[in-house]
Image (cartoon, rainbow, N blue to C red):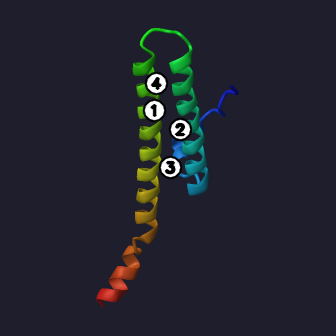
Amino acid sequence: MAMPAPLPPSSQIETLPAALVRARAVADANRLRALARVALRDGAPMPELRAFNARAAARRVLAHARILMEREAAETARPEPTALAELAA
């Protein structure tokens, strides 16, 4: 398996375009799911538990990306304070 690209600095994560965040989350989730499949076949102890943990991590990655996208959508939909002041006047 190829190694994933390194993450950008945490200061840049909030400013990444939505498509890039989604693509990265899907790629990470797919890699974790592949790790779960390997865990079931590699012969190491407790394969079911390791596979379950990898699949749970994939779900958490996707859920976190979903939260980031919802937060970004809510922030872009929020009107500017000056626009609100003009509406109130």
**Along the polypeptide, which appears first: circle 4 or circle 2?**
2
Q: Is residue 59 left or right of residue 33?
A: left
- The Cα atoms of the two marked residues, 3 and 4, are separated by 30 Å
Q: Is residue 69 above or below residue 26?
A: below
Q: Which residue is mark 1?
A: 55
Residue 7, given in percent of the width and then of the height, sits at 59, 36
Per the rendering, the mark at residue 29 is: 2
Residue at 57%, 21% in the rendered image: 38
Q: Are marks 1 and 4 in contact (CB under 8 Å)?
A: yes
- Provide the secondary structure element on which disc 1 rests: helix
What residue is shown with label 3?
A: 14
Instruction: Inspect the image, locate mark 3, and give the three-letter code of the amino acid beneath it.
Output: Glu
| Dot 4 amino acid type | Ala
For residue 59, which quarter of the picture? Answer: top left
Q: Which residue position holds label 4?
A: 51
- Residue 49 image point, x, y percent: 39, 20
